[in-house]
Image (cartoon, helix red, strand yellow):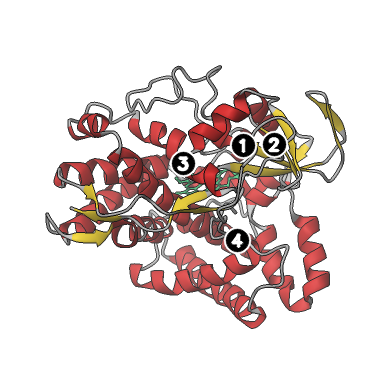
Amino acid sequence: MYGVEGSADRGDVAGEGGDEDIDLGHWSVNADPDAFAERMLAGDPIRRSERNRAWLLMSYKAATEGFLDPRLSSDRTRTFTRQIERRGAAFERTYELLSGWMVFRDPPTHTRLREPVRRAFTPKVMERLRQSVEDTVDELLGGFERGERLDLKARFANPLPALVIADLLGVRREERVRFQAWSDRLAEIVFSVETDNYDEAGVVAATEEFISFFAEQMEHRRHHPGEDLISKVVNSGLDELTELEVVGACTLLLFAGHETTTNLLASSVRALFEHPGEVERIRRGEVEDTFCDELMRVAGPAKAMVRKVAEAHERGGHELRVGDTVFLVMLVANRDPATFADPYRLDLGRTFNPQLGFGWGSHLCLGANLARLEGTIALGQLHRRFPDLAPDGEPPRWRGNPLGRSIRDLPVVL
Ligand code: HEM
């Protein structure tokens, strides 16, 4: 959905203004988003990138208007049909599963798929998750010693969200390893729509494994309901979703909530190394309600969201044609001085902060509050327990593509 596995090579420029083409996937955008945003915000807020084969909506106004415009579609089902034709009938089930991902659909199907899941995030479910996050953070950090050297991304930022999602879905934590393997397989196809670089048998097998695993979980929950999300969805009494759609929702939650949260945690720790004064505010508990959104604004993992033009229209003097690709560029919009006071300053106490890192409008991230909970508890505990936390060695190695950015690893001394 917004994976960052692709990697940008060191080239010349990401777009210097004037007639130079822009490349949102360029390494320099990942390494220095402030410099890129400043350059972009000085020019036309809507620009064409030939390199990315997309229209880029970059100011806060252009991006939020894009998020709210029904002429810009999230629907990918036509692409899926084309892929089945190209890749063969074996993929039909995989694309059927992906068609149940709300993030790839427009209303009214989007609304039908989203509502039961949205309602399942009840206050009781969230309270249970708070406990799960606190316990999991405690457990993971409890295994480390002060002064120890380790890769904090691999040992902390990566396992935490996966364990929390297992709890959200109410499945045993030991199952996490199996999930991860299936998820990685499915990711091959989600992120390789334009290529044929995937293991066909592996993807098809992973789809079937996912379906039979979650179908079993659903059957169990019908008779033994608990305070987990699957129980809430299958026992909503509304029977709005088919079995495959519930499986689709579960797989989407696994995808949408894992790598994104891992990358937010890792990039945030890295960003905070440059701001010891701000870290002190976290340690003292002064900025508990605001710091996570500020880190999302400057270090959020999603750079842009993709839409397709469903109805030809004129936008800021440009003609957008049906089928054109549009990127809603949150990385730039989140630094727009027309919305954010002093946008290049990290201010963890920022109170007016309508950052777009979780999207905007009808597809607004369903897990935003869970991600905030994880970010707030994880980063708070980490900095309180390990006040001498410091980078171990060289500057971060960024990777990314036009849609997302992350650091490869996070070597630290605790
Ligand atoms: C830092 C972590 C996260 C980031 C940066 C993030 C970002 C986003 C963004 C930008 C969207 C909007 C997609 C669009 O407009 O096309 C989205 C949607 C979504 N997110 Fe997240 N997310 C995060 C964590 C989570 C978590 C923890 C979950 C659940 C466990 C989750 C579940 C979802 C779902 C289900 C959608 C689809 C909503 C829809 O299409 O209506 N996300 N997320």
Considering only vertical position in the picture, is 197 above or below 390?
Answer: below
Please name which of the two marks, 1 or 4, marks the residue nearer to the observer.
Answer: 1
Please name which of the two marks, 3 or 4, marks the residue nearer to the observer.
Answer: 3
How far apart are labels 1 and 2 at the CA level? Answer: 6 Å
Q: Earlier in the sequence, mark 3 or mark 4?
A: 4
Considering only vertical position in the picture, is 380 above or below 257?
Answer: above
Label 3 CB sits under 8 Å from any ligand 1 atom: yes
Residue type, mark 3 in image: Gly
Horizontal arrangement in the rendering, residue 159 relative to residue 302 (left or right): left
Q: Quadrant of the N terminus?
A: bottom right
Q: Which mark is residue 248?
A: 4
Residue type, mark 4 in image: Gly
Q: Which residue is mark 2?
A: 56
Viewer-closest of 7 and 17: 17
For label 2, count other residues whose C-alpha is less than 10 Å away and answer few (under 14), some (14-19) or many (20+): many
How far apart are labels 2 and 3 at the CA level? Answer: 18 Å
Please name which of the two marks, 2 or 3, marks the residue nearer to the observer.
Answer: 2
Q: Which element carries disc 2, helix, strand or loop?
A: strand
How far apart are labels 3 and 4 at the CA level? Answer: 25 Å
Is disc 1 in contact with disc 2, using a CB cutoff of under 8 Å? yes
